[in-house]
Every structure is written in structure tokens, then in C-alpha cells.
Amino acid sequence: MSGTMAPTRDRARPDTPPGRNARPPQRRNLLRARRRAGLLMVAPAVLHAVIWIGIPLVAAVVLSFTSYDVLTPPRFVGLENFRDLLSDNVFRRAVLNTSIYTFFTVPVAMAIALLIALMLNTKLAGRAIFRTAIFIPQVTATIAVALVWLWIYDPRSGLANAVLSFLGLDGPAWLSSTDWAMPAVIVVGVWQGIGLKMLIYLAALQSLPADLYEAASVDGASKVRQFFSLTVPLLRPATFFVFVTSVIGAFQSFDQVYILTDGGPANSTTMMTYEIYKSAFREFRMGYACAQSLVLFALLLFLTLLNRRITGGDRATR
């Protein structure tokens, strides 16, 4: 055996040259410049959110624990406003009416919008005209829409009762009847909300991969089977978005009720937003109105999280 020793495996490696992993100065300067540019571009949106969302939200939370009538300084009353809400029959009726309005307007409008989007996604003659006509109510001022429907529902000279009279039926006093006022408001909400939902569904349909449908056709799948097995699952992100935004919009409905019924008759069409408006700007109970607003916010947050859990919103939005 040779007397020389075998080389050790732990031989020290040469040191990494200094600055090997360091970024060149030019790149560091470019990254800093991009970061500053990004912050400058985001700053207006952040400032807008802080001024018009953050500060009002904090103020609403603080004022909800006070008695405040605008004319005198706020007086801390603790949970009194929330205790009053529990015994407020009109506000409970408003919560029920808002829930009924949302329950009927959102799914009905979504179903009709999806059906129209499916038809307009085909090679239909004049489809651009139909798309524009259906979307126009969405961009029309809600006040103008409500005034048009106010004429349609007029019991003496309105279009609705004229059509019923032509068919030999007696039309009701739509907006003056406790039985028909809410259905009349729901019809207006459905009609006006179809346009935006249709547009979102149409954009989603046009982005679906055509090769999947070709493969399904080759396998012998019918149009109905393709709709339920391919279209509906692939539209989950759009459906989740449409549902959440529609629920939020329905719970914030105010203009139609204000113009059409003023919350009547006998509070049969009053909504949560309308009761908040009455408390704040008719009765000058700002603290109580802020408490009502927090209840509305809590309901919207709960419904959004519930829908996200049920429909798998985390996966749907990916």
C-alpha cells in the first residue's frame, strides 16, 4: 500500500466570487423606478378607496353607537340602536321584502340572461342589434326606467292594463295594491338586470374552447347533454361573479322603490336601503341609520361567503 494518503472528500470549495448573485446597479435602479411608477399609478385608487370607502365605513361604525341628528353633537348610547332594530317591525319587514325581491330577481334574471346569451352566441341575423337593445336598460338611468314603468303600471292609461283589457281581463291597480306592488317591482328589477348578466355570460361563452364541443359531438353527445356537462361547469366563474354582484345590487335596490311606490302601500315594498334613507334624511336619525347600514353590510358579507362556500368560489375564480 502506498504511503500517500487518499484525498479527502471534504475538500474546501473555492469561494463564490463576490457579487456573483448580486443584481447589477442598472437592474436595481430599473426595479426601483418600476416600483415607484407602480405606487404612483395605484395611489389615486388607494386614495379614492380610503376617502370614499374607508373613512365612511369607520364613521358608520362609530356613529352606529351614538344618537346623532346632524344638528347636535353625537351622544354615545352604546348598543341602543341595535336593540331598537330588533323591535323595529318596519325594518324587519324591509329585510323580508329585500330578501323576497332578491330571491326572485336574481335567479330569474340570471336564467333569462343565460338563455338569451346562448341564443345570441349563435349565427343569428341581426344579433348585434338584439345585443344592443337588451343591454340598453342597463345603461339607462334607473329614474328614467322607473318613470317609464310608472306609466306602464298606470291603472287607467297604462300599457299593462291596456294589454289585459284587450285580452278581456281586468287589470289591477298595480302599485296601489298590497298584493301586486311587490310583483310589479320585481318585474322591473328583472327586466333592467338582464342586460349586464347577458353580456357577462356572452363573453364567457365566447371564451369556451371549441375543441371540447367538437369532441363531445363526435362522441354523440346531444346539445342538451353538452349544455349540462360542458357549458354549465365551464361557466362556473362567470356564474359566481354574476350571482355575487346581482345579490349585492338587489340588496342595494332603492331607485325603483322610491319612484314607483315610495315603500308602500302599507310598507309592502319597502327595502332596507329605503329604510336607511328614511332614517337618515327624513327622520335625521343618523346613528340609527348607520346601525341599519351595518346590518345590511353584515347580511351581504354573510351571503357572499355562503355562496363562495357552497359553489366553491375559491376554485371557480381561479
Image: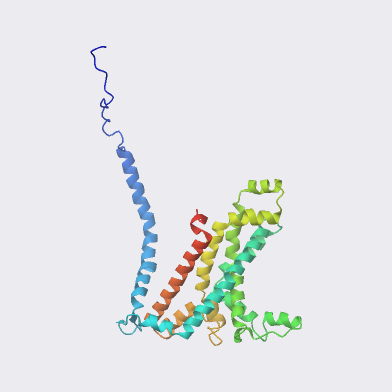
Quarter of the image that includes the N terminus: top left
Q: Is residue 255 left or right of residue 25?
A: right
Comparing 51 with 65, the one in front is 65
Comparing 167 with 246, the one in front is 246
Picture coordinates of residue 150, whole percent (x, y): 61, 80
Q: Quadrant of residue 196?
A: bottom right
Picture coordinates of residue 39, whole percent (x, y): 35, 54
Q: Is residue 97 left or right of residue 6?
A: right
Residue that extends furthest to the top in the rendered view of this protein: 2
Picture residue at 39% right of the left edge, 80% below the top:
82
Q: How many marks?
A: 0
Picture residue at 59% right of the left edge, 80% below the top:
182
Res. 162 visible in picture:
yes
Q: Quadrant of residue 24?
A: top left
Picture coordinates of residue 169, whole percent (x, y): 74, 83
Picture residue at 48% right of the left edge, 84% below the top:
90
Picture coordinates of residue 4, whole percent (x, y): 24, 14
Name the colour scheme. rainbow
Q: Is residue 272 left or right of residue 225?
A: left
Res. 131 visible in picture:
no
Residue 132 in the image: above or below residue 71: above
Residue that extends furthest to the front in the rendered view of this protein: 1
Picture residue at 72% right of the left edge, 85% below the top:
170
Residue 97 in the image: above or below residue 47: below
